[in-house]
Amino acid sequence: MKKIQEILKKESYKKIKFKVTKTQHLLIKATINGVKGDFILDTGASNSCVGFESIELFTLSAQKSKTKAAGAGAVGMLTQVSQKNILKLGLWKWKDFNLVIFDLSHVNQALTQHKAKPVQGIIGADVLLEGKAIIDYSNKYLYLKKL
C-alpha cells in the first residue's frame, strides 16, 4: 500500500509542516509579500486575516471594509481588507490573495496567557478550500494542491 505522502505528491500537492501549540492550536509559518510570520491554521475561520499591527510588516495596501468580523468571543469588530497579496506556505503559492485585517489582540492575549507566542494572523478556510487541503494530524502536515 502506498503512503499518502507519495500519492499526494503525484497529485501535485505541496507538503507544509505545522506544530501544535500548548493551547492545541495548529501553528504554521506563512510568508505574505515576502515577509515571514506565525499563523494559526484555523479550519473554522472563513477568511485568512492579520492584525492591524501587521499592515506595515507585510506591506499591505489596506482598504476600508463594511464587513464586521466575529470570532473567539468577540463580535462586531471593524475590519479592513487587503487585496492582491502573495501568500506562500512552504512551496505552495497563491499570487492573488485577499486578506481581512482586524484587531487580533484578543487572540494574542489568550495565547500569551497560556504562555504561547503571539501570532501575526490566521490562515482560514479560504486558503484550505483554494488549495483543496488535506490535513494529516498524526504527522503534522498540511497538504495543499498546486494552483
Image (cartoon, rainbow, N blue to C red):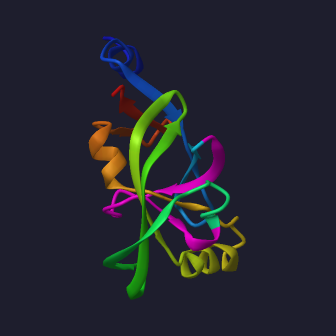
Whether residue 123 is visible, yes or no, is: yes
Q: Is residue 120 left or right of residue 146?
A: right
Closer to the camera in the image, 82 or 129: 82
Give residue 18's quadrant in the image. Answer: top right
Q: Position of residue 137 (x, y in %)?
A: 43, 43
- Residue 64 falls in which quadrant of the image? bottom left
Which quadrant of the rendered structure holds the C terminus?
Answer: top left
How many numbered circles are shown? 0
Q: Nearer the viewer, residue 107 or 64?
A: 64
Q: Position of residue 106 (x, y in %)?
A: 55, 82
State which quadrant residue 42 falls in.
bottom left
Front one among 3 and 31: 31
Classify residue 128 as left or right of residue 23.
left
On the image, the x and y values in percent for residue 52 come to 57, 72
- The reply, left or right, for residue 89 in relation to residue 83 is right
Residue 55 shown left or right of residue 64 in the figure? right
Q: Residue at x 38, y 56 (%)?
A: 124
Is 38 contained in the magenta span? Answer: yes
In the displayed structure, 126 sits above or below 109; it is above
The span shown in magenta is: 34-53
Residue 79, above or below 89: below
| Residue 43 at x, y percent in the picture | 35, 56
Please name the residue shown 49% across and 42% down the image: 87
Res 140 seen here: no
Quarter of the figure that contains the N terminus: top left
Q: Residue visible at 52% across and 37% down?
A: 88
